[in-house]
Structure formats: structure tokens, C-alpha cells
Image: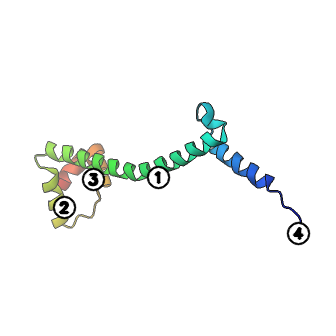
Amino acid sequence: MPRVKRGTHHVKRRKNILARTKGMMWGRKSKVSLANTAVLKAGVNAYRDRKNKKRNNRGLQQIRINSAARALGTKYSVLMNDLRKKSVELNRKVLSEIGRDYPKVFEKLVR
């Protein structure tokens, strides 16, 4: 059986790693061992922060709804409870945008 040299696969793997570290500084963009570590850590951070972004946005939406509600004399928890009892099917994202951009419409929702 003839010997198979895998140079093309090795080069392709290194090129792919170095392509993913484009824009990084110092040896992380040019040295394969440092680039490999940088790629792995960047992937871990990206995965984690995609989850954290959702968490942060929900907190921001709650703050916006609460500030708009307090301007009308109620609280976030009371408002959300009343909306749930009246079967208003608006999520927090839409409520926060209405409270921020259309205060008169939000006031009608609260009343």
C-alpha cells in the first residue's frame, strides 16, 4: 500500500485557524499554536455572550417598562400582573419599545 502524505489537510487546517484570527494582535494572528488558543477562547466567549446578551436585554426592557410605568403612577410588577389578568399578549420587548417611543399609547395600555 502506498504511503499517503497529508500535507494538504495540515496546511488547510492551519490556514483556517489563521483566517479566524484575522485582526488579532501580535503572535495570535500569525503563530499557529497561539492562534489555536485564541480561536478556542474566542469561540467560548462568543457562545457565552450570546446567552448573556439575551439576559442583559431582558433586564434593560424591564427597566424601561418600569420607568415608563412609574411616570404614570404604577410599578412594573403591578403593571405586568394587571396585563396578565387582562390577557394582554404583548411581550416585554414590545412593551419597552412602546413605553420609550410612544408614551401616549403606553398610557392607554396602563389605563
Q: Nearer the viewer, mark 4 or mark 3?
A: 4
Total labels drawn:
4
Residue under pointer 3: 95
The Cα atoms of the two marked residues, 4 and 1, are separated by 44 Å
Amino acid found under the numbered disc labelled 3:
Leu
Residue under pointer 2: 83
The Cα atoms of the two marked residues, 4 and 3, are separated by 69 Å
Residue 21 is labelled as none
Which residue is most to the top? Answer: 26
Residue 1 is labelled as 4
Instruction: Tell me whether circle 3 and circle 2 mark residues in contact (CB < 8 Å).
Output: yes
Callout 2: 10 Å neighbours few (<14), some, many (20+)?
A: some
Residue under pointer 1: 47
Location of residue 25 (image quadrant): top right
Amino acid found under the numbered disc labelled 2:
Leu
The tag earlier along the polypeptide, 4 or 1, is 4
Q: Nearer the viewer, mark 4 or mark 1?
A: 4
SS for callout 2: helix
The Cα atoms of the two marked residues, 2 and 4, are separated by 74 Å
Q: Nearer the viewer, mark 2 or mark 1?
A: 1
The tag earlier along the polypeptide, 4 or 3, is 4
Please state if 3 lies on the left or on the right of 83 as rendered: right
